[in-house]
Image (cartoon, grey):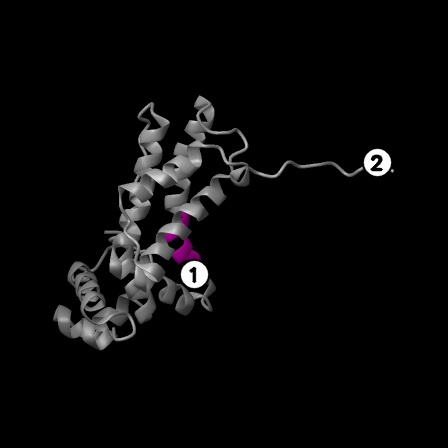
Amino acid sequence: MNLVFASHTGATPRSAPKILSAARDILTARGYPALTIEAVAAEAGVGKTTIYRWWPSKEALVADALAQAFRGDDIPDLGDTRAELRRAVDMTIDNYANKDVAVTLPALAADLFPNTELMARFREAFLLRKRHKIAVALRRGIQRGDLPADLDTDLLQDVWAGTILYRRLMIDSPLDDNLAESLVQLALTSSPALTKPAHTGTPEA
C-alpha cells in the first residue's frame, strides 16, 4: 500500500488498511465535515497517536483514504481509438460516480490549498497521474490519424471531468452509457473548439 500523504516514507503501518477503511466508512455514513481523527480512531480500534504518527492532519488522512479508491489505470493499446477513449471516459466516470470521492474532493482541495506541499501531492494523486495515462491513449489516436494532430488533450480531459463532476454534484444527472458515448464522440468529431490555437508570429513592421 502506497501512502501518498503520510508524514513518513518507507514501511506502511500494519494498521493502515483498517484506518483508511474506517475513514471511508465515516465519509459514507456522516460526510467529510463530520469526520474527525477521534472518530476514525474509534472506528478503527486504534489510538489517536497511531494516526497522528503517520498523518499530520485530517485532510492528509482523508486524501490517502480516497486515493486508495481512485482509479488511475493505464489505457492499453487496443488498436482501436474509440475503444481506448471509452475506457478513459469510463474510468473518469467510475471515479466521480463514487459519491464519497465526488462530494469530498472539492472540499478536500479547498482545505489543502494553503499547504503547497500537500496540494502538490493531491494534484499528482488525483489528477496528473490519471491525466498522463489518458493523454498517452489520446496521442495514440492522433498517431493513427483518428484524432486531429492539434487536439488539445488537456482541454478535452477538462471537458470530460468537468461535465461528469457537474452532472454528479450539481444536477444529479445519470452517468450512463449515453453520456460516455457522447464524451467519446466529442473527441472523435474533431471540434475546432478542442484544438490548440495556431501560433502566429509577430507581424513584420
Q: Which residue is mark 1?
A: 119
Q: Position of residue 59 (x, y in %)?
A: 33, 68
Q: Is residue 193 left or right of residue 186?
A: right
Mark 1 secondary-structure assignment: helix
Relative height, residue 17 to residue 44 (above, below): above
Q: Amino acid at mark 1?
A: Met
Relative height, residue 153 to residue 139 (above, below): below
In the rendered image, which quarter is residue 100 located in?
Answer: bottom left
Q: Position of residue 97 (x, y in %)?
A: 27, 53
Q: Position of residue 190 (x, y in %)?
A: 49, 33
Q: Which residue is mark 2?
A: 204
In the rendered image, which quarter is residue 52 located in?
Answer: bottom left
Mark 2 secondary-structure assignment: loop
127 is within the stretch colored magenta:
yes
Callout 1: 10 Å neighbours few (<14), some, many (20+)?
some
Which of these two is toward me, 14 or 95? 95
Q: Is residue 184 left or right of residue 62?
A: right
Region of the chain picked out in magenta, as a range: 120-128
